[in-house]
Image (spheres, helix red, strand yellow):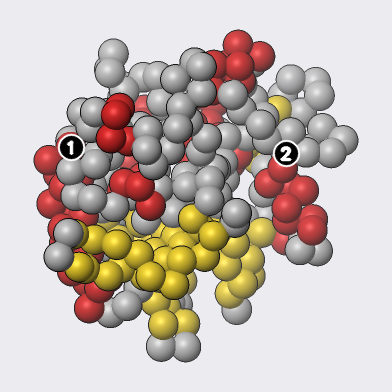
């Protein structure tokens, strides 16, 4: 998760287990919009086998065969049918795995049958044409049966909700910027997966274009700081969100919302 950053440095921030894994969240964002419920990214879903779940230490089983995402929606009083929009930042298995689900007979169907699913056009194309490096993260059963609405570049998908291209992790990755009541929040997804990744060069080994990630972050941080965006971290197990601050040493966070 930290690429070329030495372990002696990153393990002070997030200690690894005996198998060299660190805890990560699969945080999805639910937006209550006049156009209906909007779900941004869908976690890892339920379609992977036991070996996969063991390798990654997946813990997302809910009650009665559901996923913890469905349970979380239920806690808010919502059913999967209530979700009207699903927006994917990109199509890696840990972001789009829950777009679809496998029923007890083995059939794969849409998890949110009444939703319109939105992704960047070139991301879908990229996901469908993998090579030896990219194939492990793009699993066809996560997107081949999804009737996506495709967007091109920066797009206002719904009033106050924009997809903004943030390339680097993958070439057509997007973050989702939300404006409401004069405030802005940005679901940065894998541009900055955890708050520990805020320093510009703390870039994941998974990123296909790390130097592009660096420049995308530099640009986004300028806007985020100037406009006081609330940044929301998809993979951070403890820090849900915060606002950027720059001190002499680099970037930091204020107004952190923590779970611990
Ligand atoms: Zn991810």
From the viewer's perspective, is residue 13 above or below residue 30?
above
Alpha carbon distance from label 1 to label 2: 32 Å
From the viewer's perspective, is residue 72 above or below residue 179?
above
240 vs 45, nearest the viewer:
240
- Residue with the mark numbered 2: 67
- Residue at the spot x=35%, y=47% of the render? 196
Q: Does the image show residue 199?
A: yes
Q: Position of residue 166 (x, y in %)?
A: 26, 53
- Residue at the spot x=87%, y=35% of the render? 64
- Residue at the spot x=53%, y=46% of the render? 237
Q: Is residue 259 left or right of residue 208?
A: right
- Per the image, label 1 sits on a secondary structure element best described as helix
From the viewer's perspective, is residue 192 above or below residue 77?
above
Q: Is residue 28 left or right of residue 10?
A: right
Which disc, if any, is residue 210? 1
Graded by Cα atoms within 10 Å as few (under 14), some (14 to 19) or many (20 or more), the crowding at tag 1 reads many
> In terms of sequence position, does the residue under pointer 1 or pointer 2 come before the other?
2
Quarter holding the N terminus? top left
- Per the image, label 2 sits on a secondary structure element best described as loop
75 vs 14, nearest the viewer:
14
Q: Are marks 1 and 2 in contact (CB under 8 Å)?
A: no
């Amino acid at each position: 998760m930290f690429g070329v950053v030495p372990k002696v440095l990153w393990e002070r921030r997030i200690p690894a287990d005996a198998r060299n894994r660190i805890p990560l969240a699969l945080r999805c964002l639910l937006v209550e919009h006049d156009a209906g419920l909007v779900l941004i990214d869908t976690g890892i879903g339920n379609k992977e086998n036991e070996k996969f779940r063991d390798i990654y230490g997946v813990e997302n089983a809910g009650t009665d065969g559901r996923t913890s995402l469905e349970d979380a929606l239920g806690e808010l009083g919502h059913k999967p049918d209530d979700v009207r929009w699903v927006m994917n930042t990109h199509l890696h298995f840990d972001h789009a795995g829950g777009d679809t689900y496998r029923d007890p007979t083995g059939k794969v169907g849409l998890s949110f049958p009444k939703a319109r699913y939105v992704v960047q056009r070139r991301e879908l194309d990229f996901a469908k044409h993998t090579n030896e490096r990219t194939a492990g993260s793009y699993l066809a059963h996560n997107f081949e049966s999804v009737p996506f609405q495709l967007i091109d570049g920066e797009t206002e998908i719904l009033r106050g909700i924009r997809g903004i291209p943030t390339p680097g992790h993958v070439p057509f990755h997007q973050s989702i910027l939300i404006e409401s009541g004069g405030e802005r929040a940005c679901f940065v997804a894998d541009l900055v997966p955890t708050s520990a990744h805020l320093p510009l060069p703390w870039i994941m080994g998974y990123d296909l274009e790390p130097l592009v990630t660096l420049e995308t972050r530099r640009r986004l941080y300028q806007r985020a700081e100037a406009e006081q965006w609330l940044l929301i971290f998809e993979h951070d197990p403890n820090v849900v969100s915060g606002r950027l601050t720059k001190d002499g040493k680099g970037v930091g966070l204020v107004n952190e919302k923590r779970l611990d």
